Image (cartoon, rainbow, N blue to C red):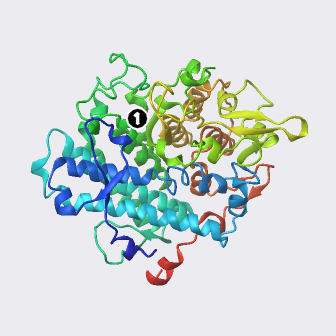
Amino acid sequence: MKLRLIMGLLLLIATISSCKKWLEVEPESEISAPVLFSTENGFMEALNGIYNRCSETDLYGKELTFGTPEVLAQNYTMGYNEGLNYTPTSQYNYSNSKFIERKDKIWAGLYNAIVNANLILENVDKKKNIFTGVNYGLIKGEALALRAYLHFDLLRLFAPSYLRNAAGKGIPYASAYTKDITPMSSVSEVIEKALTDLEAAKKLLAQDPIRSAGYLVNYPVVTDTTTNTEERASIPFLQNRRHRLNYYAVCGELARVYLYKNDKTNALNNALEVINAKKFPWTLKTDFNAFEEAKKDRILYKELVFAWYIPKSWYVPGPTEDIKENWFVTGTRGLYLNEDAAKSIYETSTGTVDLRFKNWLSITGVGAAKTYDIVKYNRNSQSDAPAANLHYLMAPAIRLSELYYIAAECTYPTDPGKAITYINTVRFQRDKEDLNVNSQEEFTVALIKECRKEWLGEGQLFYMYKRLNRAIIGQTGTTIPATDKILVLPLPQDEVVYGGR
């Protein structure tokens, strides 16, 4: 488990085929670095391999999206099937064996992906002459962005927040491909290293195709190239830029990291760059509300600035191969919301009915046994073909709405009215009436409530509680104190023993 051993792992790559989209391939072989990095396609394969690794179930294909952070944020009612595995986690029992297994796999998996990003970065400048068009900037920029993105999530899980202890022990920031032990960095050092990588990535991605006026965001089922051009590029590597750490995704991640550092000026500037680009349209309410499953947009696909493509993540032998049957099982067997919790999160006792409540939760049971299934990731078919569903199955990573929330938080101290306008812009899209608050504390409480509604099942709320040093709100209204004992996950034991932590 120690970081020195992780550094020695070979790179699993995914072969690119002209007849398959890059995001449909699976890891197939191990290739030595000199052979892999002898061609432009080899670099593309290596980068795709990192995205594929991150989309597996121990990382963003399950655990870091629907799993551990959501349980820690008290966003599920524990069922008697899957809930048995996660109940100790919901109680912050960090000595539980199943929790330790999941947590250690997250640590190892993220560092494995980081190592392979470093392998690309070690070779890309040496072979700069083999790249065509904008591919050098895209490959190096995405590799730097991935390295920063993954380190930042490790920091948010395994280290104290910047607000509580900026000088405290953080994580190792692995910025080179080496078998040597990477030294521990402080929280503030990790933040600065991540910002350096992200700022460099932003410059390299300046010519990202997604920035062109002709790149139009829409659903893959839309064949009219005047309204959707995301799959029009001549090679798969340049298609579906929202499925990768594109230019705007890097701006979004910069906004996140700067906000974590409490640098609201830079956080706001990066958030506004995404907002003002007007590249990502709000999902039409008719698409969100569509009755026919094949035409329904449950995850607000057009609003995803960046997301992980995860159709294979849930495939298991047997007749059931979707998230619903393996995670959010109907009734009380899996992870769900009891009636009081569901209505409390979405504040159903006041105002209009939230579209997220209507479309992400499905009532089941009767009388006192009434519960809500979480159907946010339901599919019309196990197939991911555009004919079967309106969009690909994605694990949201950065949403347009998050950039509005960041802009609101950064703006409130100097312009409360404008800050509320940012929040109300999102609320309008979800069919909720305008919000009114009268103080900084009321604003912060309201913002957390809005984020909890928007991010259900996406793994982000826990990090917000931690960043703000706010108590976690339990489903019955109880609060869990914001202490490092709760908010900082223990390092893997092998890292402590062999890494001298």
Crowd around label 1: few <14 · some 14–19 · many ≥20 (10 Å): many
The single residue placed furthest to the right in the displayed view is: 368
| Residue 495 in picture, x, y percent from top left | 47, 77
Which quadrant of the figure has residue 455?
top right
Query: Looking at the image, which is closer to me, 237 or 482?
Result: 237
Q: Residue 178 vs residue 89: left or right?
A: left
The single residue placed furthest to the front in the displayed view is: 318
Query: Looking at the image, which is closer to me, 337 or 416?
Result: 337
Q: Residue at x 81, y 41 (%)?
A: 340
Does residue 310 show up?
A: no
| Residue 296 in picture, x, y percent from top left | 57, 24
Give the residue pinned by disc 1.
Answer: 274
| Residue 150 in picture, x, y percent from top left | 42, 57
Q: Is residue 165 placed above or below 21 in the rendered structure?
A: below
Q: Residue 324 vs residue 223: left or right?
A: right
Does residue 137 show up?
A: yes
Instruction: Give the structural element (helix, strand or loop) at label 1.
Output: helix
Q: Is residue 267 placed above or below 346 in the rendered structure?
A: below
Question: Across the whole image, how many numbered discs are drawn on residues?
Answer: 1
Q: Residue at x 72, y 35 (%)?
A: 346
Q: Residue at x 36, y 53 (%)?
A: 27
| Residue 103 in picture, x, y percent from top left | 56, 65
The single residue placed furthest to the left in the displayed view is: 129
Q: Amino acid at mark 1?
A: Val
Q: Residue 344 vs residue 492: left or right?
A: right
Query: Looking at the image, which is closer to me, 50 or 409?
Result: 50
